[in-house]
Amino acid sequence: MRFDVNLSILFTELPLLERPAAAAKAGFDAVELWWPFDRPCPADREIDALRRSIEDAGVRLVGLNFDAGDMAAGDRGLLSRPDGSARFRANIDVAVGLAGALGCRVLNALYGNGVPELSPDAQHDLALSNLSRAAEAADRIGATVVVEALNSYESPTYPITSSAAAFEVIDRVGAANVAFLADLYHLHRMGEDVLALIGASAGRFGHVQIADDPGRGRPGTGAMPYDQILERLDASAYRGPIGLEYRPVGPSAESFGWADRWMPDEPASGADGRDAQGAQDAQGAQDAQDAQDAQPSAEQAKSGE
């Protein structure tokens, strides 16, 4: 089983360009990112600096979001929004170019919040058009575009809040390289049986992300049966990495002991040289507190992903 670290929610105690090396030091060889810039077309020097930081760290970029708008202000994607469509289209080639340069083969296109003055059907048609454009561009580098369902508690006007709704979008696009991003935290929070979903639909997953519910902490801090979930994923048709997209309590590098049993060859026990059991013991003492105290940082609060 392979895990990757989402550097937009983990290691946020460090500057962006230092995070890939921190993930490598913690025992990971793969990372993913939400769109890390505040505009769709950043300067070449900014893109080059990020690319070099990933390459120099010796990690692979396995997932990248297209620009999703002003996340801090509540945006949750641009696909379906008339006021964001041009921005999304401007970002397509930039995001695909960065992904292609780093060998990344999964790009996440967040659907976008509902627009009260526009009918859902009109928004849906715009989303499908933009998703088709993104899929065509991604196909040039052999990449898949994924569609994600979010939970309505954190993103109340985001219309794609179930696997069924996401599959409907994917089916209507009809492109072979559009798949489902199964964020199990969001799906569980919306009441879906994630074990049943994995059993029935893992072959349609383009990527998987995990965190525990409630609290969006690391697995083991909430109510989700992660031993069963990971066993089911391991036995399923899904063969991609599993993205760690949870909010750590304390230093990110000390939050990975729970994963050691699933990564026996390369334990992710922390960057400070402690053995795996020591990391697990330190975390175990915090479990009860983690479930209550996990709070997003200013950067993490930018996204309800």
Image: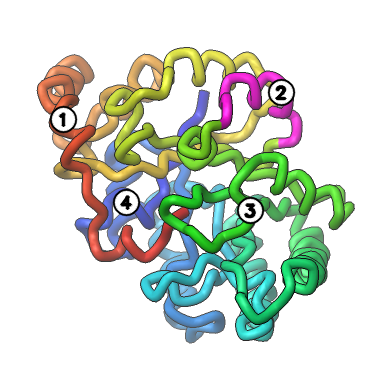
Badge 1 density bin: few <14, some 14–19, many ≥20, Cα 10 Å: few
Badge 4 density bin: few <14, some 14–19, many ≥20, Cα 10 Å: some
Q: Decide which of tag 4 and tag 2 comes sooner along the chain.
A: 4
Judge left or right: residue 258 versus residue 274: right
* Mark 2 element type: loop
Separation (CA) of disc 1 from disc 4: 15 Å
Q: Main secondary structure of the magenta part?
A: helix
Report which residue position mark 3 lands on: 160
Q: What stretch is highlighted in magenta?
A: 192-204
Q: Decide which of tag 4 and tag 3 comes sooner along the chain.
A: 4
Separation (CA) of disc 4 from disc 2: 31 Å
Which of label 4 and label 3 is nearer to you? 3
Separation (CA) of disc 3 from disc 1: 42 Å
Which of label 2 and label 1 is nearer to you? 2
Which of label 3 and label 2 is nearer to you? 3
In the rendered structure, are the residues bearing label 1 and label 4 in contact, judged by CB atoms less than 8 Å apart? no
Q: Which three-letter amino acid code belongs to the residue tagged 2?
A: Ala
> Residue at the location (39% across, 75% down)?
73
Report which residue position mark 4 lands on: 21
Q: Which is nearer the eye, 31 or 203?
A: 203
Separation (CA) of disc 2 from disc 1: 35 Å
Judge left or right: residue 152 versus residue 172: left
Report which residue position mark 1 lands on: 273
Report which residue position mark 2 lands on: 237
Q: Which three-letter amino acid code belongs to the residue tagged 4?
A: Ala
Question: In the picture shown, does residue 273 fall above or below 231?
Answer: below
* Mark 3 element type: loop
